[in-house]
Image (cartoon, grey):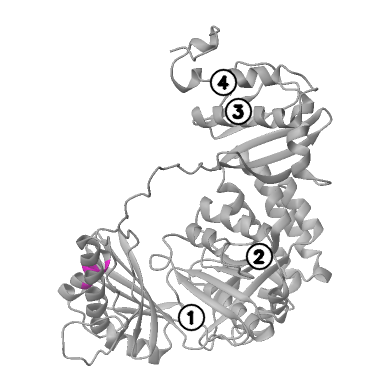
Amino acid sequence: MPLPGRCQSGDDRRTGARGVIPALVRDRLGRGPAVAKAGEMSAIESLLKVMTLRDAEAMILEPGKIPSLRRRGQVEALAMPALDAAMLEAFAAPMTNERTEWPAMVPFTDADGAQYAVTIDKLDAGYKLTIRRSKPAPLRQASPPPPQPDRVPTRPALVVDVHDPEDHAVPPESPVPQPGITGQVASARESTAAGLARLARLIAPIVAFAHERGASDITLSTGAAPRIRVDGKLETIDLAVHDGELAAAVIGLRGERGDADVSLDIDGVRLRVNAFVHLNGHAVAARLIREQVPSLADLGLPGELASLVDVRDGLVAVCGPTGSGKSTTLASLVDLLDQRRAAHVITIEDPIEYRFRARRCLIHQREVGTHVPTFADGLRAALREAPDVIVLGELRDRETIAAALTAAETGHLVLATLHAPNAAGAIDRVVDAFPDAQQRQIRWQLAAVLRTVVTQFLLPRRDGGRAVAVEHVPVTPAVANIIRKGELQTLPTAIQSGREAGMIPLERSLAKLAESGAVSPQAIKKIAADHDLLASLSKR
């Protein structure tokens, strides 16, 4: 149907959103460089509305070229004249001020409140803009929306007296009924509380035994004897677990979900628990959490890491495989920060592990599934809660990584864990989380905000216990340049030659363990990435 007051060209006689290219855009684009800046701003905003109508991921605006949209991996040119360089300059210059490094990433909000992320690059011909939708415009409603039910399932951290003869337990603080909470949600909460109580009674004897043995993990599974992990090795223990009770506890915790993460306190021992189903039945994996937060020295970490808590902004990533102690290192850094300076710290964890007893800092601990729906939601909320430091349990997905980079850019110190085998792997993991079209921008953003990458491994000691091996990579100007160019194959050389900058290659840490004789050569070789470097650094 033709729009009122305008003619339709051949291109305009398309149906649906593709045909809705406002005449206002073409009118303003045709006025040339003498147009007032306000008019040019409105022309750009009209183009943004076209991007929204066509459900495009991005719009590319270049001087002397026709605007194009990126939709579902394809690039489509709009049916309109090429853009004038003066118009793009009028839009971009006020947002970049006197910036000397390009490209620049800036936010933009249009008159309707819709938010966009604008990447601005300065070319010889003028400014090139890549605009992506960041947040949809708020809906304008004549009346307030009806109350919505609480859709975030609470995950109570239950403190259970396992000697209570009753077959039920109540969380320490019973939730106050709220208007709009459906009976289904309330029933799910009751089921979770009952599952926690049942599980606590089921595993209490195993927890006591594991704690006495110094175990790090407990695993229960249908049809199998319980196992504990001591010094990284699984051991079978002679304690019976009733399969029916295990199934009832797991079903109560999981509800309709595939698995469930919860925290428990049993006779003073704190646990991080995951309950799940598998081919042969039900299972529980529990990590025992130390009562006191260990220091960096207790963990065997190098003293150079203490300087990380003096960083005022940017991203610090603690990496390593599962079970390498990343969360404990993060907790140790928070405890050290609490000793050194007064700061507002917000942690986002899944679930909460160590409970901090704040001294100089104000520490707010938030749990995914209980206090915030997701890591990304918790991060976005944290930016409005005036923190100095944000502690993130895991950089898990693209949305969380993007929010973490934004938080680091806006003057916050972000401490986070990441599953990666080394610094190069961590950088690749962050960049590869984004589509190809965004990766150059992410490399520049990461080079600007990344401060340090720490990677750690735990190796079994010959005399019992485990020893830690560390790679420490401060992001120097040379490392930042490597990240921007994507030349990560040169990063190991920069690490080896950067001793004065505080670099610690993994092989140097492994060589010290070899020299001390604390760890077997076989265990060291399994971890080392560069055996030639390891041999040159080792004296034996």
Magenta: predominant secondary structure element?
helix
User: Which disc number belongs to residue 46?
Assistant: 3
Question: Cβ–Cβ below 8 Å for labels 2 and 4?
Answer: no
Amino acid identity at mark 4: Pro
Rendered-image quadrant of the C terminus: bottom right
Identify the image quadrant of residue 374.
Answer: bottom left
Q: Where does the image place residue 33, in percent across and percent down from the top left?
A: 79, 22
User: Which disc number belongs to residue 354?
Assistant: 1
Please report the bounds of the magenta region as a residue range. Answer: 249-253
- Of mark 2 and mark 3, the one earlier in the sequence is 3
- Of mark 3 and mark 4, the one earlier in the sequence is 4
Q: Say if the magenta span includes residue 251.
A: yes
Q: Is 297 positioned to the left or the right of 324 in the image? A: right
Secondary structure of residue under mark 1 = loop
Question: Cβ–Cβ below 8 Å for labels 1 and 4?
Answer: no
Front position in the image: 456 or 525: 456
Q: Answer few, some or many: residues within 10 Å of disc 3's Cα (few below 14, many 20 plus, some between 14 and 19).
A: many
Seen at 31% across and 83% down, the residue is 172
Task: Identify residue for label 2.
Answer: 412
- Of mark 2 and mark 4, the one earlier in the sequence is 4
Depth check, mark 2 against mark 1: the one in front is 2
Question: Cβ–Cβ below 8 Å for labels 3 and 4?
Answer: yes
Front position in the image: 298 or 451: 451
Seen at 70% across and 34% down, the residue is 129
Seen at 18% across and 71% down, the residue is 248
Q: Give the residue at the far front of this rendering.
A: 142
Q: Answer few, some or many: residues within 10 Å of disc 2's Cα (few below 14, many 20 plus, some between 14 and 19).
A: many
Mark 2 to mark 3 CA distance (whole Å):
34 Å
Mark 2 to mark 4 CA distance (whole Å):
41 Å
Identify the image quadrant of residue 264.
Answer: bottom left
User: Which disc number belongs to residue 22?
Assistant: 4
Amino acid identity at mark 1: Tyr
